[in-house]
Amino acid sequence: MTKTILRLTLSGALLLFTALAVLAAKYFGAFFFGFYPAFSRWVTGVLAGITSVVPFAFCEILLVALLIWFIISLVRAIVKKRMVRWLTGVLLILCILVTAFVGIWGLNYYAPPMRERLGLSDRQFTVAELKEATIYYRDRANEFAYSVERGEDGVMIEYDFSELAKAAGDGYETLSQTIEDFGGSTVRVKKLLSSSLQGKLGTTGVFICLTGESCVSTTTHSASMPFTMCHEIGHRMAFAREDEANFAGFLACAANTRPEFQYSGWYCAFRYCYNALYAQDPNAAAEVWSGVSAAVARDWADSVEHYRALRSETAAEISDTVYDAYLKGFSVKSGVQSYGEVTDLLLVWYFERMK
């Protein structure tokens, strides 16, 4: 009984600490985020350095080990009739993981908007301005589309994953010379051992702060692969929200010297802007599409077929529902729709920095 009480007490203390940390982030943000993002980048960088000694995604091995322990310990608890002790043990482990997640990285969801940290304004854009920016990103995608290698079908080839993974951080190293927020770890991206499953779920990548690993599924379409790698490193840079990780990924791709990263960044930026324009004005979107190069159009069409063949609608819907609830639980009101909100950042970046 003593162990049970101790576990419950520790679990309660951890939950209280986590709640206080969230309150501090929400109501004392000016002070709290004066140091927390740098702290988060430092901790995840240390963890990334430790786990980088193995070439595989260490987080997946830990998850499997945790599941095995869960099953074995449950069976033992049933046999020995110690279910209460087992339940309190599971509760304590969950509390430790939640506290570690929130303390190390999760509080970044409450950070000031990325636009503030980069010195960008916050304003609304007209459809005409959206169209202008979309044309700009289209033309840049067209420009780099023929600088990458393509197969006989005209689609960008699948570059070697290991080579891309090692080079994905180069753009961030360039950005860090002028922007402090990009000064985190750039150790290589890792491929997910569960890539086939992730393809069915519609997941292209994941960042695990408890191991510092930025991981990408090998089922990600070739034209989006470099951008996705940079997106996951963007999370390690303490950009928790998906739109901000997208924008960080775009900036890193644009700053990379390798053409496959440059093209992937501009191609994905164009896709986000085009989809936003199409939702607002299909006719304007049609006019923009008329200027899309054959190479970009081929990559776009192939990616649609690629994910349609991989994705299991039922599994993907369940996965999206769970992730949507997770994001909303961390004050991301738009949930999974937040990925597309990168368009706002792309627009302000174009009008204030690129035009």
Image (cartoon, rainbow, N blue to C red):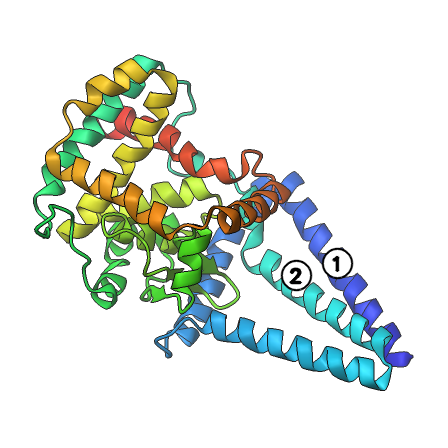
- Under mark 2, the amino acid is Thr
**In which quarter of the view is residue 342 placed?**
top left
Viewer-closest of 132 and 255:
132
Q: Are marks 1 and 2 in contact (CB under 8 Å)?
A: yes
Q: Position of residue 22 (x, y in %)?
A: 66, 48
Identify the residue at horizontal 33%, vertical 33% (top origin): 272
Element marked by disc 2: helix
Image mark for residue 99: 2
Q: Is residue 182 left or right of residue 354?
A: right
Quarter of the figure that contains the C terminus: top left
Residue indicated by mark 1: 15
Identify the residue at horizontal 38%, vertical 17% (top origin): 280
Check disc 1: other Cα within 10 Å, few if <14, some if 14-19, many if 20+: some
Element marked by disc 1: helix
Label 1 vs label 2: CA separation? 7 Å
The image shows residue 87, relative to residue 351, as above or below, that is below
Q: Position of residue 188 (x, y in %)?
A: 31, 66
Query: Is residue 178 at least partly visible in the picture?
Result: no
Q: Position of residue 301 (x, y in %)?
A: 24, 39
Identify the residue at horizontal 90%, vertical 80% (top origin): 2
Image mark for residue 184: none
Check disc 2: other Cα within 10 Å, few if <14, some if 14-19, many if 20+: many
Query: Is residue 291 at least partly visible in the picture?
Result: yes
**In which quarter of the view is residue 119 placed?**
top left
